[in-house]
Image (cartoon, rainbow, N blue to C red):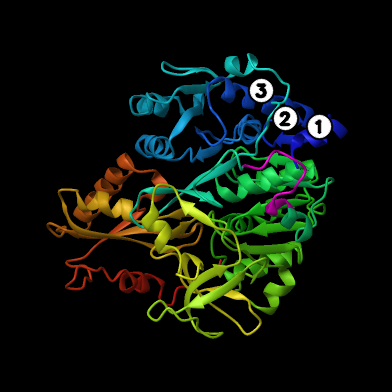
Amino acid sequence: MHPGLHAATDPDKPAVIMAGSGETISYAQLEAEANQVSRMLRAAGLAPGDHVAWCLENHRNFLPLVWGAHYAGVIYTPISSRLTSDEIAYIVDNSGARAYITSQHKADQSAEVLDRISGVGLRLMMDGAVDGYESYEQALAAASTEPLANRTAGRDMLYSSGTTGRPKGVLVSHEAYDPQEAVSVGEEWSSVAELSVLLLGMSQESVYLTPAPLYHAAPLRFTKAVHEIGATSVVMERFDAEQFLAAIERYGVTHTQVVPTMFVRMLKLPEEQRLRHDLSSLSCVLHAAAPCPVQAKHRMIEWLGPIISEYYAGTEGNGFAFCDSQQWLAHEGTVGAPIACEVHIVDEATGAEVPAGVEGTVYFSSGGTFEYHRDEEKTRNSRLANGWSTLGDVGRVDSDGFLYLTDRKAHMIICGGVNVYPQEAENLLTMHPSVIDAAVIGVPDDDLGEAPKAVVQPVRMPADEAAAADLERRLIDYCRAGLAAVKCPRSVDFRSELPRHDTGKLYKRLLRDEYWQDQDRRI
């Protein structure tokens, strides 16, 4: 399904509402602007299977751009607007993008990356242009609103950081995109749309609120599914706990998706603020992306009722586990049972599947397939010889087949629902002249769930607390000058030595356990 089908039957229905400004994009407008985008890309020489990248905040043009890229049959890569200029330039280059689109909000960084993306043929900027970029609005206005005669379904390729620290593009299904075999834009639903209808009860009458950045996999794919179904999507420009609750009341929201950090922030609101809004329209609150504290989830169910569902999946789309409130209460702490796939817990040492209750690496089979863009080794390492694939998480299943995660991807830190891989910060810190060795781990954080902490072996141990505080500040500033703030440590501890094996392997688990042992996760 696609917006054009709904534009034909209900053209004036709101497809997108920007929660802050209240600006509404009807289905007729969404279809017309998406058609213009598709023609604009084709006019610039992009053919089905070519790549386009953009770096945008939750802009009113974001979803018309998504659908236009989809209609043009291109592979599209939304880039996090929180990344550094170096990270943005790397992704544009690595993806092979032939077009790059951004906004005035990112003007400074757009100028900084210009030299590194000068080979990109089409560079556009919304809300005004700087040197090296043309006006997005002018380019769009020059294109017809009529649909392309040969619309071909495109797909996203989102970037997920790897253990080497550099982001990797995840192309679901297969890397070799053959436009001759690509599916035409038609009336079929995507798997996400099907799940939204069958599991979440979504319909054309639904109103879906997305408070998270649209460049992340779940907000992007679920919001796109909303338009396949013909429902209305309300987009928050940025998350604010009270404004989120106010938007539910204002727009009669029926469905929403959050990360556990948002639960925590709502629960920490003064009771007067938290309870002043009418949330009776809500029929489903979906959450994922990070482990949810058990007590936080209990409190959310007590507050909103048994309308909270949870799922476990990855950008890679190789598997999906799901549970509703009743299932979760009966299997406290689970992330769900597999749907349309099979889950296997494997002993990495032997390669054998282990029985229920025993921990191991979580693998999926009979789900989707994926490739890591330009990284055959990482793709190969993500699967077994029998084709089972993993995201690298450790967990177990119970006797009823419900999955529990007991560890995270290798050493990944999930900070407020954002996946943070510490290798980049470790590599940066190790090169600082005051540092001999460094490890970055996730430590408990009441607001974010966990936050990055650096444990550093300095060249000279600080003489006192003032010297330690000064070095801590300088190391954090050093990281933030080279990486997005979310990837940087929020605090630094100093050690005379880090726990390394003679082979050089860092026993990061020993460090992490010190900070998590006997941790009180209560809110």
Mark found first going from the N terminus, 3 or 1: 1
Check disc 1 and report its element: helix, strand or loop.
Answer: helix
The kind of residue tagged 2 is Leu
Residue position for label 2: 30
Magenta stretch holds residue 76: no
Q: Residues within 10 Å of mark 1 (few under 14, many from 20)?
A: many
Q: What residue appears at the point 24 percent right and 51 percent down from the top-left corner? A: 429
Residue position for label 3: 36
The kind of residue tagged 3 is Gln
Q: What residue appears at the point 36 percent right and 50 percent down from the top-left corner? A: 488
Whole-number angstrom distance, CA of label 3 to CA of label 1: 15 Å
442 relative position to 2: left or right: left
Q: Residues within 10 Å of mark 2 (few under 14, many from 20)?
A: many
Asked if marks 1 and 2 touch (Cβ < 8 Å), the reply is yes
Q: Is residue 356 above or below residue 322?
A: below
Check disc 2 and report its element: helix, strand or loop.
Answer: helix
Q: What residue appears at the point 20 percent right and 73 percent down from the top-left corner? A: 501
| Range drawn in magenta | 182-193
Main secondary structure along the magenta-highlighted residues:
loop
Residue position for label 1: 7
Q: Position of residue 260 (x, y in %)?
A: 58, 59
Magenta stretch holds residue 185: yes
Whole-number angstrom distance, CA of label 2 to CA of label 3: 10 Å
Q: Which mark is residue 361?
A: none
- The one of 353 and 486 positioned closer to us in this rendering: 353
Q: Position of residue 407 (x, y in %)?
A: 46, 71
